[in-house]
Amino acid sequence: MNKKGQTLILFVILLPIFLLLMAFVVDTGIVLKENTKCKSMMKTVLKTTYENRFDTHYQEQVEKIMKKNTIPIENLKIKVDQDIIYLENEYEKESIFGSIIGIKEYKIKVSIKGKIENETLKIIKE
């Protein structure tokens, strides 16, 4: 029985699977990095909104901070009630390897809620 070439066939079969797995890991890392970046920026924006909640132009200040840190603000929602500040942002991040399996963009959605107690801000929901 001739066993020449079996390793080559196995390599040819497993190589695309390994490459797809690596592409999935890279895309997942990019999405997690973007989500973490947006969450930390939303915490900063929440503090800025709290400090300027009586100012009529606080939304412009928030948008300026977000643009400076390259976070899209098309779907940014800011709600300020008596003692609750709610921020929500949703945008899409382009996929690098997801287009191989038909995913062109990943949705990043972050919402954060802060409550004002005794003139201090406490994050109650991330």
Image (spheres, grey):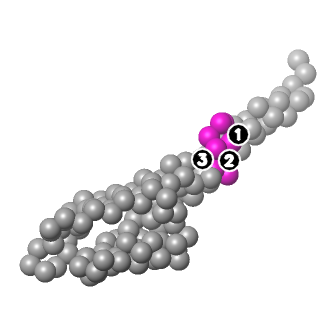
- The residue shown at (9%, 78%) is 118
Magenta residue check for 98: yes
Residue 52 x/y as whole percent: 28, 81
Relative vertical location of residue 37 with respect to residue 53 in this rendering, above or below: above
Cα distance, mark 2 to mark 1?
Answer: 6 Å
- Residue pointed to by mark 3: 105
Relative vertical location of residue 92 with respect to residue 83 in this rendering, above or below: above
Cα distance, mark 3 to mark 1?
Answer: 12 Å
Quadrant containing the C terminus in the rendered view: bottom left
Amino acid, disc 1: Ile
Q: Residue 100 shows which numbered tag?
A: 1
- Residue pointed to by mark 2: 97
- The residue shown at (55%, 70%) is 70
Which residues fall within the magenta stretch? 95-104
Cα distance, mark 2 to mark 3?
Answer: 10 Å
Magenta residue check for 20: no
Disc 1 element: helix
Label the magenta part by its dominant secondary structure. Answer: loop
Disc 3 element: strand
Amino acid, disc 3: Glu
